[in-house]
Each structure stands twice: as structure tokens, then as C-alpha cells.
Amino acid sequence: MSTPVLELRNVNKSFGPIDVLHDISLKVRAGEVLCLLGDNGAGKSTLIKTLAGVHEPTTGKILMDGEEVTFTRPKDAADRGISTVHQFGGTFPLMTIGRSFFVGVEPTKKIGPFTVFDRKTANETAVKAVREFGITRIDDGDRLIGGLSGGERQSLAIARAVHFGARVLILDEPRPLWV
Ligand SMILES: Nc1ncnc2c1ncn2[C@@H]1O[C@H](COP(=O)(O)OP(=O)(O)OP(=O)(O)O)[C@@H](O)[C@H]1O
Ligand SMILES: [Mg+2]
């Protein structure tokens, strides 16, 4: 069998005296879909945040392609191709669709000696990506995220993860419009 893209070995996570994750082991291979079920407060989001570099495991190992990895911040996980749509947040209410889509990886253009944010490219790309996802009501990349519905925001976050070529796409209770 192929080496798992992502593997957890005996991962535990505590917040001070509160033990949330107990000995979690799992393997995900290329092309597989893994579904995580649990009651409210069971620890699903905590596990996802541990995979996304938001939390470090208290003990246990995370492996990618059979190699142990340590994520001390979300960028470490993102750099390895782990893209996460969190249960809450993930987009920025006071930003436009185009800016929120490209936050941290902004397209730029030159105006004379200056390098500036390429708003037109960002808006067009973001709107196209989210429309390809079926959210055809969005046609203006200058709209503020704060004015979108919950499902539209989550769809935008998923479209962004897909656009940037996630190797591992993690969705924490996404609620797209068609559900
Ligand atoms: N930063 C934190 N500090 C302390 N306790 C936390 C922290 N984050 C989560 N917890 C606790 O860990 C437990 C698991 O929370 P988590 O958000 O992972 O649950 P969940 O399975 O995602 O629940 P839901 O289905 O409601 O989204 C809860 O009891 C929660 O209160
Ligand atoms: Mg949760």
C-alpha cells in the first residue's frame, strides 16, 4: 500500500488540565476522503487545528509522506499543502472578496517604480473561483466579506483552498449553500 500523505500517531492534546484528544491515530492516503464524527465538544475542531498548525500536539507525532513534521504555526502546515477551512472564521469581514481571497499571497503590478496590489486580477480570479464553485450570485470582487452569508463565506474559503492547490483539504463542518 502507498505511504499515507498524512498520518497521526498517538496524538494527545491537553489545554492545561483539560484533556481533549486521547491517543488519536489515523492515516489518509492520496485520493481518500476521511470523515470525522463526534458530539459537540468531542474534539473535532481541536484535532483539525492540530493538523493545521494552530495547536501543537501535547504528545504524539504528525507525519507527511512518512516523514515526521512539526507545525509551530499555520503557515508551516500551509507550506506542506494542508489547507483548512475552519468552522469559524477563515475569511475577513472587513476585507473585500478579492483581498480576502489573496491575503498573504497578493498579486502585484508595477506602477512606475512602485509595486502595488493588483486589485483587478485579484477580484477577477476570486469571483471566477467562487462562481465555478456554484456561487453565481457573487459577481463583484469589491464586495465586503461581512455582507456575504455564512455559506457564501465558507464556499469562498473552500474555493480559495482548491484554487491554491491544496494537497490535503480539511473542512470543519462546512455549510455550503446547497445543504
Ligand atoms: N483553546 C482551548 N482551551 C481550553 N479548552 C478548549 C480550547 N479549545 C477547545 N477546548 C475544549 O475542548 C473540547 C473540544 O472542543 P472542540 O471545539 O474541538 O469540539 P468539537 O468536536 O469541534 O465540537 P463542535 O461539534 O461543537 O464544533 C471542548 O470541551 C472545548 O471546550
Ligand atoms: Mg467544532
Image (spheres, grey):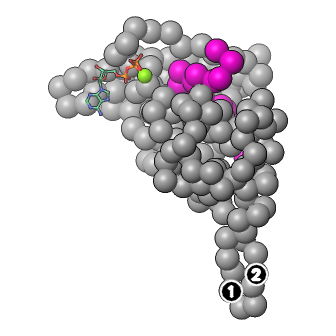
Query: What distance separates the C-alpha of mark 1 from that of mark 2?
Result: 6 Å
Residue type for callout 2: Lys
Ligand 1 image-quadrant field: top left
Q: Residue at x 37, y 12 (%)?
A: 40
Q: Which residue is mark 2?
A: 110
Residue 25 point in image, percent of width and height: 50, 17
Residue 78 located left or right of residue 9 = right
Residue 146 located left or right of residue 79 = left
**Residue 176 within the segment the image draws in magenta:** yes
Q: Hey, which residue is sitting farthest bottom in the picture?
A: 113
Q: Is residue 65 visible?
A: no
Q: Which residues are magenta?
A: 163-179
Residue 131 located left or right of residue 13 = right
Asked if marks 1 and 2 touch (Cβ < 8 Å), the reply is: yes
**Residue 134 within the segment the image draws in magenta:** no
Residue type for callout 1: Phe
Secondary structure beneath label 2: strand
Residue 51 point in image, percent of width and height: 51, 33
